[in-house]
Amino acid sequence: MSLARLQKEPLSNLPYYEERVDLAAAFRWTARLNMHEAVANHFSLSVNEDGTKFLMNPNQVHFSRIKASDLLLIDANDPETLSGPNAPDPTAWGLHGAIHRNVAHARCAMHVHSIHATVLASLADSTLPPVDQNSAMFFNRHVVDANYGGLAFEAEGERCSQLLTDPKVKVMIMGNHGVMVIGDSVADTFNRMFYFERAAETYIKALWTGRPLRTLSDEIAEKAAREMDDYPGQAERHLAELKAILDEEEPVYRN
């Protein structure tokens, strides 16, 4: 089936079609990177002004199979969400619902148990130090949750959401759990999640050597972080390139 044919139907029928396509692409590429975990983990994207209506993956569908039309449209203020026939995973509702109710600037939220971020989350000190350019990107821009309280049902989700209220904080290292990344769009958030995992991998492997680390000064780390905050267009180009590859190799993600 041609890409034009796949686009024609959803464009006329699906609300928030382009947002759905971006999110479906992020799911599929996360699976390609082996940053997913079985049929768990969740991404969400706000689609209204106050951020309380959002798209999210359906319950227990593998990231590699998610299509634009599969995504659920959820109201963070609807207490009956878990009673419907297409209810999301309860922990996804607890965590992402709380974030979209309480953190308006978190337009997109991506939660994974990727290997290196989760190793970092398992250390007694889960802070990511600025040992290279990628890790400097997160200097003063991540928070560590050291109070894991079990699965992220509603009470745990509410607690976690309060750690993201500072607009400068874009990553929550969820101690003994994984990582939550937020951003302004799918492109912004996916790009940040990708680089956080790469930074965590570099740091963990540097620790493996047992040799002293060359850590950047606070001044240089903050300078590098600000420069990357303002770097023009990279996140958008990153996602556009991934979508171009998917358009060639598995265009059904747009359906």
Image: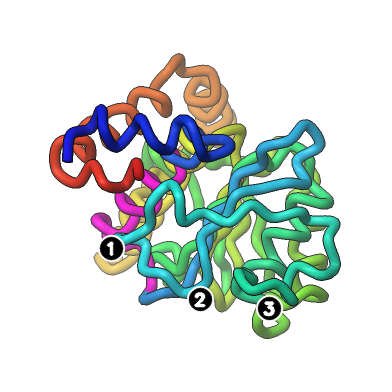
**Residue flagged by tag 3: what amino acid is it?**
Tyr
- Of the two numbered discs 2 and 1 on the same chain, state the one appearing first in sequence: 1
| Residue 74, picture quadrant | bottom right
Residue neighbourhood size for the residue with mark 3, other residues' Cα within 10 Å, grouped as few (<14), some (14–19), many (≥20): some
Q: Which residue is drawn at 69% across and 42% down?
A: 106
**Residue flagged by tag 1: what amino acid is it?**
Asn
Residue furthest toward the bottom? 150
Measured along the vertical axis of the image, is residue 90 above or below residue 11?
below
Separation of residues labelled 3 and 2 (CA atoms):
11 Å
From the viewer's side, name the closer residue of 66 and 140: 66
Image quadrant containing the C terminus: top left
State left or right for residue 212 relative to residue 170.
left
Labelled pair 2, 1 in contact (Cβ < 8 Å)? no
Q: Please name the residue that numbered disc 3 is placed on.
A: 148
State left or right for residue 246 relative to residue 194.
left
Measured along the vertical axis of the image, is residue 96 above or below residue 254?
below
Give the residues in magenta: 22-37
